[in-house]
Image (spheres, rainbow, N blue to C red):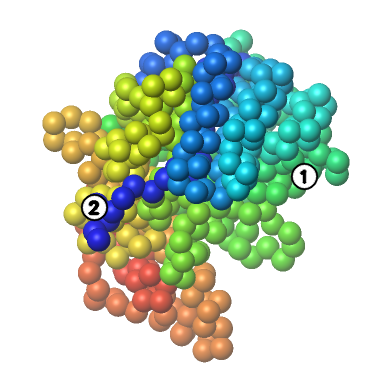
Amino acid sequence: MSERSRPPLPFREFLVKVHSRCNLACRYCYVYESADRGWRAQPLGMAPETARLACLRIAEHARRHALRSVRVILHGGEPLLAGTEFLARFVRGLRAALPAATRAEVALQTNGTLLDETVLRFCHAEDIRIGVSLDGPPVVHDRYRRDPAGRGSHARVAASLELLARPEHRPLWAGLLTTVDPSTDPLATYDHLLSYDPPALMLILPLGNWTVPPPGRVPDPALTPYADWLIPVFDRWYGSAGRAPRITFFESVIDLLLGGDSASETIGGAPSRLAVIDTDGSLTLSDHLKTTYDGADRTGLDVHHDPLDALLDHPGVAARQAGPAGLCAGCRACPLVAVCGGGHYPHRYRAGSGGAGHDNPSVYCPDLARFIGHVARSVAADLFPATGAKAGRAAADPAKDGPATGDQGADGRATDGLATVDRGAGHGG
């Protein structure tokens, strides 16, 4: 059965927008500062009946597909603006509605400014893990993550992280979410994040595309500002002799190079298993699509009228579950495809009659090629230590005359056993 004709995979992760507004005004926010204006029409908070139906729809989907577990992310805006009373009712309603055989992992993604002992006691009582956004030291974090009055939020977030780091609260902490800023010092940023001793660190690339490129991502494929930032952080993390946080992006690239699977749809082309339920009950596609064009994530479906299986049949879900078959011809021919998977779906977008929509390589293609090549060489050197550095270099470059797609100079190379990453891979659009 081809990837395009296989049945859709059921959703396992549900991002629930319990509140549509935020108490920060982050300059790079993909909800309020992007092409999409749909948030303006959303109610401030999710109504109790909408919340009840959302829980029933998730439970219905879990029962129909015999899911052993689901992950539900309380999101916004800022989800804590919904209040702990509403959130408690939602979580209890969800767990009561789910089949007995289905376990619910509930998480809350917050900007960290409203966390206090009351919220943490609530999260303990309802078994909710907490992810916090922090971009680095004050000079970095406060550049973009400010409140509507223009005041930085770092001090408030830092105070919340001190609470989370206490032994009694640490089990609640899922980790830090950090947006990469290539204009900053990568190691200074990483060291600051490490100072909080997070259990995990999610490094995310800014949500840009070919029409609205991310900061610093210029057309010249020889310039790789995001790889330049990620590589020293990877080297510090990979060579760490002590305890280091889990970094999903790094771990996924290593797993993919070794023939495994990705833990994220942002790298490796893993099929999307995420559904979004908006504040008014609308069933939408990935929030990240809001950065492409107005209405890109909307489907016309909602929990008041439609089961989640109806969303499975939407072309937007099929496109994000298509795997290599859903990539452009250049990506399918590239030896890096088994590792990068074409990159994150929203990063491929190009507007206009000649833009081909998402049928493009990632806008980050040169950065991904260089970073993957660097990781491949690091892993190859560990896999072949007995034969010395010369063998390690050869293993990392087995096919000097191998195929190259597009622009030369991206240094993605690895062994056939490390996913056949050949010299020159990476077309940069």
Q: Is residue 137 left or right of residue 180?
A: right
Most extreme residue toward the left, as rendered?
353
Where disc 1 sits, the SS reads helix
Residue 57 horizontal/vertical position (percent): 48, 31
Residue 221 horizontal/vertical position (percent): 30, 50
Most extreme residue toward the bottom, as rendered?
387
Q: Distance between the residues labelled 1 and 2?
A: 42 Å
Q: Which quarter of the rendering shows the N terminus?
A: bottom left
Residue at the disc numbered 2:
5
The residue lying toward the viewer, choosing from 196 and 191, is: 196
Q: Is residue 149 above or below residue 312?
A: above
Q: In which quarter of the image is residue 347?
A: top left
At x 46%, y 70%, the residue is 258
Q: In this view, does 131 lie above or below 409?
A: above
At x 29%, y 43%, the residue is 319
Residue 152 horizontal/vertical position (percent): 65, 21
Amino acid at dot 1: Pro
Residue at the disc numbered 1:
171
Question: Dot 1: within a 10 Å radius of its alpha carbon, few (fewer than 14), some, or many (20 or more) residues?
Answer: some
Residue 227 horizontal/vertical position (percent): 45, 52
Task: Of the two numbered discs 1 and 2 on the same chain, state the one appearing first in sequence.
Answer: 2
Q: Is residue 234 in sight in this rendering?
A: yes
